[in-house]
Amino acid sequence: MEKSLLEIKSVSKQFGGFAALSGVSIDVARGERFGLIGPNGSGKTTLINCISGVLPNDGGSIVFDGEELSGLPAYQRTRRGIARSFQIPRPFASMSVLENLVVPLEYVVHRGSLHLADTEAEAMEILRGIGLADKAATRSNQLSQVELRKLELARAMAARPRLLISDEAMAGLSSNEVSEVLEILFKLNAAGITIIMIEHIMQAVMKFSQRIVCLDAGRIICEGTPGTIVANPEVQKAYLGA
Amino acid sequence: MLRFAIGALGVLGLVAALPLVVHNEYWFFAGYVVLQLIVLATAWNILGGYAGYVNFGTGAFFAVGAYTAVALYKAFALPLGLQILAGAAASGLLGFGVGMLTLRLRGIFFSIATIAVAIVLETVVLNWHYVGGAKGLPILRPAETPFFGSYTVWLFFVMTVIAVIAVGAARYVETSWIGRGLRAIRDNEGAAECSGVPTLKLKLAAATLSGALMGAAGAPYAQYLSFIEPTSSFSLNHAVNALAMPIIGGMGHWMGPVIGAVLLGTLQQVVTVTVSSEVNVLVVGVMLVVFVVAAPEGILGLVKRWKKASSK
């Protein structure tokens, strides 16, 4: 059997006396579309902060492609192939859309070895793929909500990840815009990128994910296919409002 | 790059030829201060403007450069070039050290630490009798130098070289991937780190370079005044000027601090001669408030806006 791309083993995280994560273990296979759901405060964002290195995990281990990540700073994890988008878009506001993508291309992919014009051409290619090419020269603080969400994904893509973590990339979008973002994520997955999707829009998670984990109060309460998750009484009670 | 190099060489050539046409030494004496401000403002902008980490301790970095030079001059009679290199190295190390202690934390901790460093170091120097302590130390500098004649003119040329190096370094940082990394840190440090930017390393590099340039600006200070004492060396005025000039000129571009320093520095010299040296800080304060309120992107921002409006 092929080894998992990401192995999270008994990861815990405390904030003072509050246990945000308690012994969470998840395996994500290569090329998988993986959904992470749960009510607000269940530990979803804390978990992806621990995976991406924004927060250190207090206990357990996070292994990516056979390498232990605990203790590595976020930028090293990005360089190893983990990229993420943020729940609340965090563009580099003083830069153009194109420059936003040049940063990860320079720091992760080329490490300053490629000429700026060539890096910009590469960034432009990613923008074309994601449908933001016409905004390349626009300052990122002048984008609409859906454009900001796309920029988050495009910037994560510019880091040439093997694992992309999409943190509520569809929050606040109309149904047409949700479909647009979902299509982008399907396209990226078809290109071989493993994707972890954190989302509250259930139709989107169910449609996208091959496997889903539901967290509640920092613990896994259910894991399985979308059908299993929906039918689980604990998930219904904790999250689906049954 | 080539255009900048030709421009820099042109400036140095012009400055070297100035003594042939300008015979009043006062212009060099006053010009030295403006050049010193260009170096301080440019150095401050590398960390404060590009990365968004505000240094309130410019005086400490400046004075460490000055006192390192004085101590080495007194101990070994080192030539000015080596004094400047040693002053830059000492202040660069200080920048690295303060950065190591505080730049792991985000926000204002670095700013607070730089104020604390200035106070601690000033207290140390006040009690360091080898370099004069609180009483200060007179310096006997050579009266004449070959080619330039007057030592003041020579120091003016030396400070021009330091200013050209400082501006060149800032321009390189700004236009390279290092500059884009620093801007990403300023815009959103968390997102920068997740985009592969080694934020701590970049901030440390910027703090070291910025500190080193401030130290280089301070190293000839005692030779310039023929005297050194802690109060003026560590003065908060250095910090106010270094911060105000990039804000007034425009922090996003290497030319901003140069424009701010030339404008404000010249105005300060005029005010010193015509009104009083005490009014200097008032001039800086008023201009700072005006620009922060009316033109937060500085003079360069105003020019950009004007160009945009006139092209419509």
Image: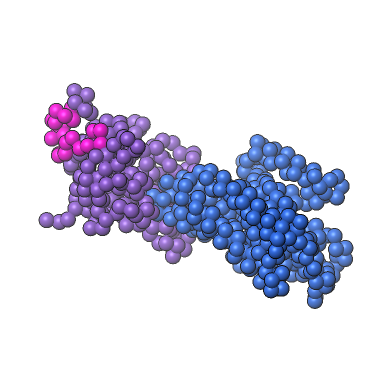
Residue sitting farthest toward the top = A242
Residue B141 placement, left or right of A167: right
Viewer-closest of B25 and A92? B25
Q: Is residue A88 above or below residue A96?
A: above
Kindly indicate the quadrant of the structure image that contains residue A230: top left
Residue at 15% x, 56% y is A2
Colour of chain A in the image: purple
Residue at 19% x, 53% y is A4
Residue B115 placement, left or right of A114: right
Query: Where's the N terminus of chain A, which quadrant?
Result: bottom left
Colour of chain B in the image: blue
Q: Is residue A236 above or below residue A131?
A: above
Percent position of residue A157, x then y: 35, 50
Q: Is residue A169 above or below residue B246?
A: above
Residue A235 is at least partly visible in this image: yes
Residue A126 is at least partly visible in this image: no
Percent position of residue A57, x then y: 30, 46
Residue A115 placement, left or right of A213: right
